[in-house]
Image: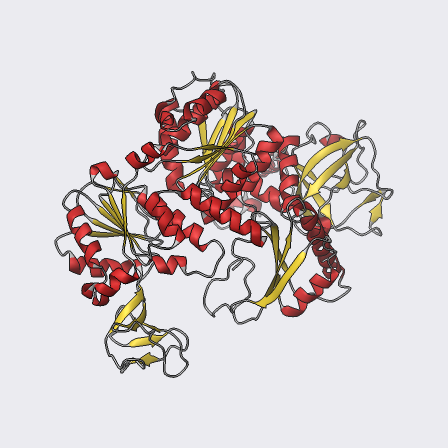
């Protein structure tokens, strides 16, 4: 039957003979796709160094070692140390053909080195594929990754996932720009405000490696000062790395560097950037095209060539603690880099953490501070409202603002914006009696009663029952007031108190970057405060007792850090800047805020922790899991002789419907936590013992010798220790 007799629109079999021949020829010339890398059965091996040592991407601890593979001759030129590869993993000894192991699943990995022979006596599987000839992992980065894994009792594969971004083929194919010559050494600028500031910048420009803990003066100049430190390092022919807590801070330092250096001299690495852009920037740093990096904690492993300076801003911010295993802290990673590369180190903040004070106390770093005259000239006036003031203030018993705070806010709004810091986000408050401040509790389960945004009745925060006819069991009062109010509720109350003034909020739902210098009330949660053009006239710090009353060792330190961060956005006292803190003035963190003395507060805290054996003087680890699993782990681990086990104690049960944090118990389950601490100098031994015990546990689970053992979480340097 001829093709003319076939229906129109047929397939390839309906085409004329000439078209069939053309189709077959096209198919023959096309590159045949390979769904799976080859097993290289019968292929010849590389003549020189036919063994590749590979780090496979398996984060389990009992597989935290290298594995040997045979290198086919066809992959000899591409299979170089540092490239990404794919290998078959998990094949048994019985699956051997032609002297080569086969089978197993395909997983990614990194080629570490090439060897002439393997120390493994059995047959080797062949490298399945070289994913890319780009050499990503060098000895310096591998050494840092290994050091971080050992310090935090984790696996190298887990740390590599944090250190190396995912591959993007399009970014990899594009060439990186040519490196620019070193810039001229910068002027010290506002570094002259500090006693050793100009000398620090000069030492960086001369190629030295000074180490400093920098207590920055309030105001916006810190971004320019960081940029000048980076520029001085680049002028010496070395690279620089700056790690900041969030994208807003990165954008400010990025703008300061661009204004000082121009375009093309630094890269910005943040987790918020798209995969292609982030990988392109990372490659530019890896190839040496860019010598300076600014970014969030994702940049702490950036492979900067000839590293001369590592800098960290606000090390007390929670964002610097990586939530993924093994949960390293950016400060500790940069300390390892400073020691490994023998480069300069700069730890800066408006506050001073106890960890930073320890660096100065031990002599590892020098203090970089301003004289008291400079502090008084740059800081705002700080006033406090304590319990005695509130007791004498009739308006404060029923209103959100004490009289003093209301007057200061009213005067400040005549000249510019006013910042109001609220320690909680959202709307729902917990209620108390307006007369005697007895907490309002549910009659059924004694849970806390909470006000609702769209309902007049109260609701229990535990059982969910509504309470429509509450009265105080202590004094018989019927009026209620909020104990701790969220940002949105505070904005509503302030809007009623100042009806002619616009009210803006900044928090998790919407974080503002900047606000204008026009009069406005800006209600913000800690860490989300926008920068005001020309600075705020007043900062009102509400509910200080709520921040200080947290059951945590670092509650006072963290409260002071958040207060100073907000107060540093206020104009100097000479320009009318005022801060009002609603907190008991006799408490140590409040006194440090009034005197603007975070260093003195940190030094006193360090002395007390040294007497009690608390971090950072001691090293501590947390072991968390079901009670039986924690008890079994503690029996099995061979702790150092100086180790002290505290606990275990039960953890709060995670409520249903709430997101589960890393290492927290699943909703409804009862877990326990034990703390293990060792004296200074024994941290490495503790991490090694915990890693060994955890590796043995995961190996037993993988073999199925003891069934499916319940999970146990091990974390070195837990942020919350009660």
Where is residue 320 drawn, in percent x and y?
49, 45
Q: Residue at x 82, y 50 (%)?
A: 95
| Residue 696 at x, y percent in the picture | 74, 56
User: What colour scheme does the image use?
Assistant: secondary structure
**The one of 378 and 266 positioned closer to us in this rendering:** 378
Give me the residue at 18% from left, 43% from top.
416
Residue at the outermost left position:
500
Horizontal side, residue 526 vs residue 297: left or right: left
Front one among 563 and 136 = 563
Question: Observer-nearest residue: 82 or 693?
Answer: 693
**Residue 199 visible to an observer of this rendering:** yes
The image shows residue 612 at horizontal and vertical percentages of: 57, 54
Relative height, residue 162 to residue 632 (above, below): above
Q: Position of residue 605 (x, y in %)?
A: 48, 49
Q: Is residue 42 above or below residue 430?
A: above
In this view, the residue in front, 297 or 546, is 546
Left/right placement of residue 382 relative to residue 94 reads: left
Residue 324 visible, this orientation: no
Q: Is residue 220 left or right of residue 657?
A: left
Q: Tell me how many marks there are.
A: 0
Q: Left or right: where does residue 351 sit relative to residue 146?
A: left
């Amino acid at each position: 039957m001829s093709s003319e007799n076939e229906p129109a629109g047929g397939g390839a079999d309906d085409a004329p003979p000439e078209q069939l021949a053309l189709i077959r020829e096209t198919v023959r010339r096309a590159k045949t796709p390979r769904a799976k890398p080859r097993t290289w059965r019968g292929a010849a091996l590389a003549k020189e160094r036919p063994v590749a040592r590979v780090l496979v991407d398996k984060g389990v601890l009992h597989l935290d070692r290298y594995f040997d593979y045979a290198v086919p001759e066809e992959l000899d030129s591409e299979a170089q140390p540092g490239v990404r590869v794919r290998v078959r993993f998990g094949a048994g000894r019985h699956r051997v053909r032609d002297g080569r192991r086969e089978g197993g699943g395909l997983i990614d990995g990194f080629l570490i080195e090439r060897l002439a022979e393997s120390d493994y006596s059995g047959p080797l599987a062949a490298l399945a594929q070289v994913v890319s000839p780009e050499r990503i992992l060098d000895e310096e980065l591998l050494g840092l990754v290994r050091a971080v894994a050992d310090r935090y009792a984790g696996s190298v594969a887990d740390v590599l996932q944090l250190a190396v971004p995912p591959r993007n083929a399009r970014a990899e194919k594009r060439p990186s720009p040519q490196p620019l010559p070193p810039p001229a050494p910068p002027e010290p600028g506002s570094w002259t405000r500090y006693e050793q500031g100009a000398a620090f910048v000069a030492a960086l420009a001369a190629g030295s490696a000074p180490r400093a803990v920098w207590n920055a003066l309030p105001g916006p100049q810190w971004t320019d000062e960081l940029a000048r430190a980076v520029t001085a390092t680049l002028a010496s022919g070395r690279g620089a790395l700056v790690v900041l807590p969030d994208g807003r801070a990165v954008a400010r330092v990025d703008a300061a560097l661009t204004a000082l250096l121009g375009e093309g001299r630094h890269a910005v690495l943040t987790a918020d950037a798209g995969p292609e852009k982030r990988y392109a920037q990372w490659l530019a740093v890896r190839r040496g095209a860019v010598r300076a990096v600014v970014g969030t904690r994702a940049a702490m492993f950036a492979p900067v060539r000839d590293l001369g300076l590592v800098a960290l801003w606000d090390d007390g911010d929670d964002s610097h603690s990586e939530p993924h295993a093994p949960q390293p802290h950016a400060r500790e990673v940069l300390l390892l880099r400073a020691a490994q590369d023998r480069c300069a180190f700069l730890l800066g903040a408006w506050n001073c953490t106890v960890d930073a004070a320890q660096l100065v106390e031990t002599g590892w770093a020098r203090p970089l501070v301003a004289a008291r005259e400079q502090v008084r000239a740059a800081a705002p006036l700080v006033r406090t409202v304590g319990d005695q003031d509130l007791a004498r203030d009739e308006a404060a018993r029923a209103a959100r603002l004490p009289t003093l705070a209301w007057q200061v806010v009213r005067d400040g709004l005549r000249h510019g914006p006013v910042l109001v810091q609220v320690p909680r986000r959202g709307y729902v408050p917990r209620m108390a009696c307006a007369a005697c401040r007895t907490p309002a509790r549910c009659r059924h389960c004694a849970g806390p009663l909470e006000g609702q945004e769209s309902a007049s009745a109260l609701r229990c925060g535990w059982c969910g029952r509504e309470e429509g006819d509450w009265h105080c069991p202590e004094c018989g009062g019927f009026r209620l007031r909020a104990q701790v109010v969220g940002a949105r509720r505070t904005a509503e109350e302030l809007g009623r108190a100042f009806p002619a003034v616009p009210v803006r909020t900044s928090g998790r739902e919407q974080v503002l970057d900047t606000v204008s210098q026009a009069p406005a009330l800006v209600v913000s949660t800690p860490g989300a405060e926008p920068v005001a053009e020309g600075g705020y006239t007043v900062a009102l710090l509400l509910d200080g007792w709520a921040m200080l009353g947290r059951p945590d060792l670092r509650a006072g330190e963290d409260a002071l850090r958040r207060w100073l961060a907000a107060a540093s956005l206020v104009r100097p006292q000479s320009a009318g800047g005022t801060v009002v803190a609603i907190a008991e003035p006799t408490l140590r963190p409040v006194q440090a805020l009034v005197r603007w003395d975070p260093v003195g507060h940190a030094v006193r805290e360090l002395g007390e922790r040294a007497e009690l054996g608390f971090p950072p003087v001691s090293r501590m680890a947390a072991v968390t899991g079901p009670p039986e699993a924690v008890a079994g782990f503690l029996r099995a681990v061979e702790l150092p002789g100086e180790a002290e086990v505290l606990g275990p104690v039960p953890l709060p049960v995670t409520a249903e419907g709430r997101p589960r944090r890393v290492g927290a118990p699943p909703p409804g389950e009862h877990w326990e936590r034990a703390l293990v601490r060792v004296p200074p100098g024994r941290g490495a031994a503790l991490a090694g013992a915990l890693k060994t015990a955890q590796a043995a546990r995961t190996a037993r689970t993988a073999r199925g010798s003891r069934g499916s053992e319940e999970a146990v979480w091990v974390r070195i340097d837990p942020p919350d220790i009660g």
